[in-house]
DNA sequence: CTGAAAGCGCTAACAC
DNA sequence: GTGTTAGCGCTTTCAG
C-alpha cells in the first residue's frame, strides 16, 4: 500500500504518468497555488498510487535547505546525555527536521574538525553541540563559531558573548540543595564534587561554597572531595571526607550515582542516613526514589534542555532564511528543582511535619 | 586553517583555482589514478587552502550511495536503548557511515510508514530498527521488508525467516539467572516479569518457567507477577508475590530497576536479602553493584548489539553493491553473562537470626 | 495555469 | 593524463 517496490519513483515518472511536466508535479508536492484543482487531484492520485516520495537529497541540493540538524553528543551510555538527546529527537520530529547524529569518542573529543566537516558536507542547517564542556575541549568555540555560516547552539557550558547556549542552571541547583540542608539544621556540610575539569561540576561546587559563605560557615578545602561521577567513587570519597572532616553532618553529592556509592558505604558501616548524616544528590535519576532511604536530589529536566535547544536553533535558522537580522546570541538557563526525600529529612527541628519514622 | 568562511567552496572553484577541469579535481578527491603527480599535488594544496570539502549530498545523489544509515530507536530516556545507540554510533563512525536518527514516540509507534518515508527520502543505504518489539508493533515487518530495496537489521526481536535480527539472548540470560539460584539452594523461586507484550519479557519468563520445569519444581501462575520495568512496580509486585506464594525464598526479577524496588520494599519491611529471599536482576545497570546488598544480575552487552548490527548491515550493503548475491538473512544472538553479587549468595553458616518474618 | 531551460555539486562515460 | 558531455532528482526563473 504505502511503500512501492524496488527503485523509488521519481518526479519524472509521476509527471509522465500524469501527462504533465515535472514542474507541475513539483507545485503539487510543495502545495503551491497556480495548479488547477483537477490537475492537482489527478497528480495527487498518481503520487499516492506510486507511493512517490520526493528525494530530500535532491531538494536540499537545489534549495540549499536541508531541514536537517547536526547533533553532536558524548557519553550516550550515561542517562543524562540520552535524555537530552531524547528531547532533541522529539522536538526535531515535531518541527519536521531530521537529525544527523555524531557521538564524540575519546579520540575525537579533542579534534573536532572532522566532525564539523562531515556535518557540513551533509549541508545541515544548524548544529546542536550537546557534548559536555570538559577541560579545554571548547577552546575552539570562539574560533569556529564566527566562521560558520550556520548557527550552533551549545549545551551545558558557560555563557559567553556571541554564542548560543542552553544549560541547566547547575549553580542554582547547587544552591537549592545547600539551602535545603541548612534549613534542615545541618551545619557541617561537606561536598563530593564531580571531576572539576567539568564545567557543571565547578558550578555545583561554587554553589556549595557560596551558600556556606553566605551563612558564615567555615569553608576549608578538606571539606570537599573530588569524585569521578561514578558510583564507585562514592565510598572512597565519603570515607576520605569523614576522615578530613569528623564533624561532618551532611554531604551534598554532585550526582546521584556517587550518592548511591555513599549510601552503600553508610549501610556497610552501619551509619544511619539522615541521622548520622544527611545527603542530597543531583540529577534525579529514576532509581534515586528507590534508594534506601530515598534520596533527596535536584531534578534537572535534561529532556527539556534538548527541546529548547532545537526550538531555538530552528528559530534562528528560519529567521535567517527570511533575511531577518539574526537574533542576538543569548544564553538560556533552565531551572532545576529540589526533590525532597527522606535522605535529608531530620526528624527534630526542620521543615514542619514531614518526618519519617524509623 | 580548517574551516573556510562563509559559503563552502565547490569543486568548480577548486577546479578554476587550479586551472583544471572539475573532473580532475574529482579524481584527486576520490584517490583515482590517472592524475599526474604534480597536478595532484597542486590540486591538493588548493583543496587544503580553501578548506574544500566535497558535498556528501551531491555525491549521494549521483552515486546512489549515501554512506548513511537510518537508525530507528525508542525509549532513549532509558539506559538500554541508549547503550545500543552508543554502540551504533561508534561502529558507524569507524566504518565511515553517517547516521540519520529517528526516535519513535507513542504516536509513531504504530504508524511506521512516515518513518520509512523520511529515511528513504534521504537515500539511506540501510536501516537499523532498534525499537523494541511490543505487542503487535512489528506486524508490518513481513510486509515491508521484502518490498524494500535496502537492507534492514532488526534489533531485539524474535528470529524470523528472511530477515536479519540481532538480539541479546534473553532466554539464555534467564536460564543463567535461574540456574544460579537453584545452585544456591533456593527452591521456591518466583518471577517478576516485564510487561508481557514485550518479546524480551516473554523470553525471560520462558527461561524461568523452563528451568523450574526441568528441575521438577512446581510452577503455578501465582508464582509470577507482571511488572512494568520501572522501579515503582517492584514493591507492589513483590508484595503480591509473597502473598500468593508464601514459601517464596528467591525471586528472579526481569530487570534491575524493578529489583531495586523490591529491595527497597525489603528494607522497609525488615526482610533480609539474601537470607529471607535471594534476588537476581537483569541488565546490570551501573548502579546495581552499589545497591545494598549488591545485586546479582545478568550483564547484557547492549553496546555490542549495536556494533554487531552496524557491522552486519554494512557487510550486506557493500556486498550487494558489489553485485554479489546477498547473504542469507540470519539471526545473531549475543550471549549475556551472569554477574554474581551478594543478593543471591546464601550464607549457609553465618548470618543467623535476622529479624525476618513473613 | 503550465512548460522549457538552467543548474544545485558532483561523478560516469567517453573523447582527446 | 585530462577535458567534455551528460545527468542524479529536484526547484527556480521566466516564457507562454
Image (cartoon, coloured by chain):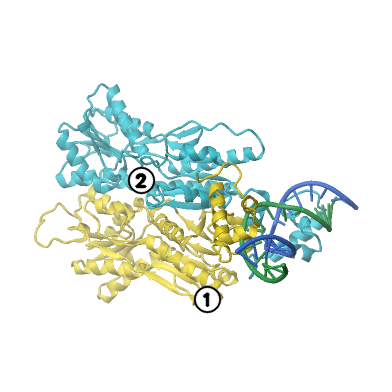
Chain colours: A cyan, B yellow, C green, D blue
Rendered location of residue A117, percent (x, y): 52, 50
Q: Are marks 2 and 1 in contact (CB under 8 Å)?
A: no
Question: Is A11 placed left or right of B80 in the picture?
Answer: right
Above/below status of A150 relative to B315:
above
Q: Which residue is mark 2?
A: A285
Name the residue at 52% across, 76% down: B326
Q: Position of residue D14 (x, y in %)?
A: 83, 47
B114 to A313, vertically: above or below: below
Find disc 1 in the rendering and name its residue.
Answer: B326
Disc 2 from disc 1: Cα separation: 45 Å
Q: Nearer the viewer, mark 2 or mark 1?
A: 1
Q: Which residue is farthest front? A: B38
Which corner quadrant of the image does residue A180 belong to? top left
| Label 2 Cα crowd, 10 Å radius (few <14 / some 14-19 / many 20+) | some
| Circle 1 chain | B
What is the crowding at mark 1: few (fewer than 14 residues within 10 Å), some, or many (at least 20)?
some
> Horizontally, is B237 left or right of B140 in the view?
left
Q: Quadrant of residue A28?
A: bottom right
Amino acid at each position: 500500500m504505502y511503500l512501492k517496490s524496488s527503485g523509488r519513483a521519481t518526479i519524472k515518472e509521476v509527471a509522465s504518468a500524469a501527462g504533465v511536466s515535472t514542474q507541475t508535479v513539483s507545485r503539487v508536492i510543495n502545495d503551491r497555488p497556480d495548479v488547477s484543482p483537477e490537475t492537482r487531484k489527478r497528480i495527487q492520485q498518481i503520487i499516492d498510487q506510486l507511493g512517490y516520495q520526493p528525494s530530500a537529497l535532491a531538494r536540499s541540493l537545489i534549495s540549499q535547505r536541508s531541514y536537517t540538524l547536526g547533533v553532536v553528543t558524548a557519553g550516550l551510555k550515561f542517562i543524562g546525555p540520552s535524555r537530552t538527546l531524547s528531547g532533541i529527537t522529539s522536538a526535531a520530529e515535531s518541527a519536521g527536521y531530521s537529525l544527523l547524529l555524531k557521538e564524540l569518542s575519546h579520540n575525537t573529543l579533542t579534534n573536532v574538525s572532522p566532525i564539523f566537516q562531515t556535518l557540513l558536507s551533509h549541508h545541515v542547517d544548524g548544529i546542536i553541540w550537546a557534548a559536555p564542556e570538559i577541560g579545554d575541549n571548547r577552546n575552539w568555540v570562539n574560533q569556529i563559531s564566527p566562521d560558520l555560516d550556520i548557527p550552533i547552539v551549545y549545551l551545558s557550558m558557560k555563557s559567553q558573548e556571541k554564542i548560543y547556549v542552553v544549560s541547566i542552571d547547575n549553580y542554582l541547583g547547587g544552591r537549592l540543595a545547600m539551602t535545603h540542608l541548612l534549613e534542615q539544621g545541618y551545619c557541617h556540610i561537606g561536598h563530593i564534587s564531580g571531576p572539576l575539569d567539568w564545567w557543571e561540576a565547578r558550578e555545583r561546587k561554587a554553589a556549595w561554597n557560596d551558600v556556606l559563605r553566605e551563612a558564615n560557615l567555615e569553608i576549608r578545602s578538606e571539606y570537599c572531595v573530588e569524585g569521578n561521577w561514578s558510583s564507585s567513587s562514592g565510598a572512597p570519597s565519603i570515607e576520605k571526607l569523614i576522615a578530613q572532616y569528623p564533624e561532618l553532618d551532611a554531604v551534598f553529592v554532585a550526582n546521584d550515582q556517587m550518592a548511591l556509592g555513599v549510601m552503600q558505604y553508610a549501610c556497610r558501616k552501619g551509619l544511619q542516613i539522615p541521622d548520622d548524616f544527611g545527603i542530597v544528590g543531583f540529577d534525579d535519576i529514576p532509581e534515586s526514589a528507590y534508594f534506601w532511604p530515598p534520596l533527596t536530589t535536584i531534578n534537572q529536566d535534561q529532556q527539556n534542555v534538548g527541546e529548547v535547544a532545537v526550538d531555538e536553533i530552528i528559530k534562528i535558522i528560519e529567521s535567517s532564511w527570511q533575511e531577518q537580522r539574526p537574533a542576538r546570541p543569548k544564553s538560556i538557563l533552565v531551572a532545576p528543582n529540589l526533590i525532597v526525600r527522606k535522605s535529608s529529612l531530620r526528624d527534630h527541628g526542620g521543615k514542619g511535619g514531614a518526618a519519617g519514622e524509623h
